[in-house]
Amino acid sequence: TLQHIFKEIFKASLELQEDDHSKALLVSRKKHPDNTIIDLNNVPVGNGTQQLIAGPCSVENEEQVDAVAKAIKEQGIPFLRGGAFKPRTSPYDFQGLGIEGLEILRRVADRHDLTVISEIVNPADLEKAVEYLDVVQIGARNMQNFELLKAAGDIKTPVLLKRGLSATIQEFMNAAEYVLAKGNDQVMLCERGIRTYEKATRNTLDISAVPILKQETHLPVWVDVTHSTGRRDLLLPAAKAALAIGADGVMTEVHPDPAVALSDSAQQMDIPQFNEFMEALRTSGYLQDVRV
Amino acid sequence: TLQHIFKEIFKASLELQEDDHSKALLVSRKKHPDNTIIDLNNVPVGNGTQQLIAGPCSVENEEQVDAVAKAIKEQGIPFLRGGAFKPRTSPYDFQGLGIEGLEILRRVADRHDLTVISEIVNPADLEKAVEYLDVVQIGARNMQNFELLKAAGDIKTPVLLKRGLSATIQEFMNAAEYVLAKGNDQVMLCERGIRTYEKATRNTLDISAVPILKQETHLPVWVDVTHSTGRRDLLLPAAKAALAIGADGVMTEVHPDPAVALSDSAQQMDIPQFNEFMEALRTSGYLQDVRV
Amino acid sequence: TLQHIFKEIFKASLELQEDDHSKALLVSRKKHPDNTIIDLNNVPVGNGTQQLIAGPCSVENEEQVDAVAKAIKEQGIPFLRGGAFKPRTSPYDFQGLGIEGLEILRRVADRHDLTVISEIVNPADLEKAVEYLDVVQIGARNMQNFELLKAAGDIKTPVLLKRGLSATIQEFMNAAEYVLAKGNDQVMLCERGIRTYEKATRNTLDISAVPILKQETHLPVWVDVTHSTGRRDLLLPAAKAALAIGADGVMTEVHPDPAVALSDSAQQMDIPQFNEFMEALRTSGYLQDVRV
Amino acid sequence: TLQHIFKEIFKASLELQEDDHSKALLVSRKKHPDNTIIDLNNVPVGNGTQQLIAGPCSVENEEQVDAVAKAIKEQGIPFLRGGAFKPRTSPYDFQGLGIEGLEILRRVADRHDLTVISEIVNPADLEKAVEYLDVVQIGARNMQNFELLKAAGDIKTPVLLKRGLSATIQEFMNAAEYVLAKGNDQVMLCERGIRTYEKATRNTLDISAVPILKQETHLPVWVDVTHSTGRRDLLLPAAKAALAIGADGVMTEVHPDPAVALSDSAQQMDIPQFNEFMEALRTSGYLQDVRV
């Protein structure tokens, strides 16, 4: 027993070191008590006002993106998303338009005075991508692509990092730490559902992750209601829950004609559905301050 | 290919039968489009007004339950919970006071004019238990204890059925069907978190299950924020999310002195914390109509 | 830091107590270093010789059970299984023949000199059931039906306890402890797959659980290859793995005509398939000593 | 109903198309019925003879790698592994020696006439890496790093692809398809445990994945017993199960002094333990033909 206590004293000193280590995490609120507020073309994210990001799953052509941009602008949403580099399960699925997609996004965003966000998947593309993008997204499948995270730490553009499909909250924070450790402190986190045994939804929205991340880190926290549920009929209730629990914003997918979309056709809203979604969100009282 | 099409036609007719079968589920909204509203001593559950259930994890003695009952009554909550038969992982953990616990609950509930709910774990105890209880709870570990479900179908007392630790939503609805099929249509469902790889919370609150269950069934749906999160610091945000997403009510645990509680000491609120919780929930605007 | 070290010393003494508590578990090998060997009509289980249990998912009628009994007897297998009380997801699925099923099992087992095992689901049925059964099975859905476990501790008949769908190994051992704590030390454990995100198999066979349970407890450990995989084409490879990793035996399902079986039709072998399975297992060298 | 049948006929023709699509997968055994046998410096993998890969988790210095190389050579194992680029959860953990690590591996492998395998994490490093490596490993965290997969398809060096932490078998096969689709058909798969709720092991070894992958694809299938279990005491039983179920080989970690290892210290064997492991595997009869 005495021997055991000495072992414990040794263990305690080890834990003290680890604790110091954890205190040193740049993402930690212990290190940085105030909220990080990210200014996106004069719209602050993380300051308590809740925001929305909307746009098509994939950029398919300029008309498609323009139709969505117009709709979200009319709803007062300043943030446009759209996928140009698409990480797809099968190599035979549509892989995105690449740089051409980023060009389309930029032109459309400029035309409607929107802030544009898109996913980058290869460290080698980052340098060129930031010429087009206001926010670089790192997707769930690349959450532990540490080379990409390090490269994202070398740029100045804000990063939206999505939680991996089966990442723990601890791993998620460490992934963000890779970006901050390299010098880019403009990082936003995004809960997008985790993989569980339940198949009624595409993933399981881990709503509790939002207050945990807000408590443990100083970074803005988004909720992607489209990928977490994978069901159009759950976007509205999931968005309400996300706003109620204190997310800094909600991300959702809108497509002019989801039935012919090149990806995720089952879960995107069309424009009238999107307008109803926004209307319902506003009348629910859960969403404020978005329309300019 | 022709052969394949014939096989499909055969399969289609099979599916038609299955579909009919599913339509026939008594819990299904297809069968019963209107909400089931359960009258609990003149307080309706399931009619759109959101409710709360509160009380200690375990009934330990009359003073303890009385202290909690007084506190929840002062907050205008009409529903008192408390465990008398405790399903515990280890046989050496406190197993509850049994019938004596039910007697305490009844006396305290009568004194404060509260509706009382408690878990029953053995079919053989049901008959006696209903002399004391207004609502019989069937717990997560017994969600597929079909003998208990059938026995609960033979009584007239309302039943609150909790989702199993790794039950699919489909299995959850089928478990409720066992009760209805036996003739008791006074059933309420309760999401209480599912078991996943993430250990930052005790379980993962599957918040999307709430709108799915509201859509698929006509039964009231509760959210147990205590067992789903297992963390006192997450009770308030989880309750907000549950109310925002449309739960019919929220269940939570309160104990006069959680530090010495015989079970679940880490996740119960003490009475001042509970009062703060209620205050915060009211000022958030998410909770209405509860205080009489 | 000094304060922290004192806290740790306090924690260490707490852990010492817990450790003692764990040492006190009756299922633990620390408490009982030798293997528990269970004598089933003069066939020992747990002594190093690996065994098989086979039989239909459900008892449907005497002819069906007799055909299977004959086949397994010819293969030298001494243990016949068959479900009389069936825990089914839907109340409209076949629920088993009940006591009549046990009577059939007993008659057939006596005719072929077999040891018979069947699941019991209600504590109230145990007393009567042991008149018919050599081994009482407690199924996965009832692994934490503590009332049933306690009742199984009051009988003298050996118990085969299956792991719950999402039970940890720790919880599984504690469930067995309920039976031993009540005085019945004739307990066998059975790994039968756990629920995960992977749907290529019905459950995920947690093969590592076998050496962990053999190491931590002194009880015999079976592997149910039918329910863990849910696929007829995986029964043989899974059985080889189970025997190689040191299971005391393998349980599998055989039905004279699986296509018309009242339950689990997709995963049961018919008799010629079963004979091939046994032949392949023997020629593989993984199975020894079974044929008399 | 008639309408429904027509819908089904339409669905059937869609499924026929999908089926054709699946038939067209290059990894599929439907497309390529014979086993792919990969020749690694005159040692065939995938031809029925079961192999082993061993080596330290991380390359730390030449002496360390040399000591392990000597030990595995003495055991007749032709394949040396060692991590030079380490994907680590935290940016502050040891990240590996990089190219210097590959140089060490190459020198040691040449000295002992071993085939060398190491993980590459950045598409940009592949071209240089193949100067040093006989096999390029793509790790679990990068299984859906599609840019890396595509780049691995452009080289001629064989690839060992590990299953992602929460990848389905279907996704795993599609990830391999990315490599084959680009022209590199020298691909080996490696089951390394999946993430589940069970924490008694680091991951859950999904042993059933082995026969499924052998059945569905023509590629060699390895089992990494170190990362799947994360426990030194389970390496031997897991290796037996892997060999019994038909894996083409087993991968395991060996370090001269695990206690001071820069990564994974709890799960690597030291050299005497490794020799015992090999001895036990041979006397068990599960391993044949390895020693030259």
Image: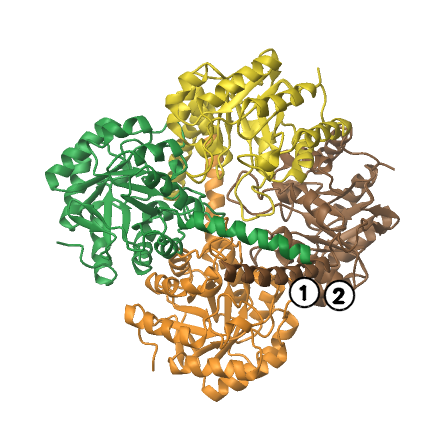
Chain colours: A yellow, B brown, C orange, D green
Q: Residue at x 31, y 60 (%)?
A: D244
Left/right placement of residue C267 relative to residue D132 reads: right
Pointer 1 and pointer 2 on the same chain: no
Q: Amino acid at mark 2?
A: Lys
Say which of D66 and D257 sits in front: D66
Residue C163 visible, this orientation: no
Mark seen at residue A138: none
Chain letter of disc 2 in the image: B
The quadrant where residue B27 appears = bottom right
User: Is A17 placed left or right of B69 in the picture?
Assistant: left
Task: Judge whether B218 appears above or below B280 on screen.
Answer: below
Crowd band around label 1 with a 10 angstrom C-alpha radius: few (<14), some (14–19), many (20+)? many
Q: Quadrant of residue C279?
A: bottom left
Q: Secondary structure at mark 1?
A: loop
Q: Residue at x 28, y 47 (%)?
A: D251
Q: How many marks?
A: 2
Out of C91 and B49, give the one closest to the viewer. C91
Q: Would you name the residue on which mark 1 appears?
A: C91
Name of the residue lying farthest toward the front: B2
Chain letter of disc 1 in the image: C
Q: Which residue is mark 2?
A: B182
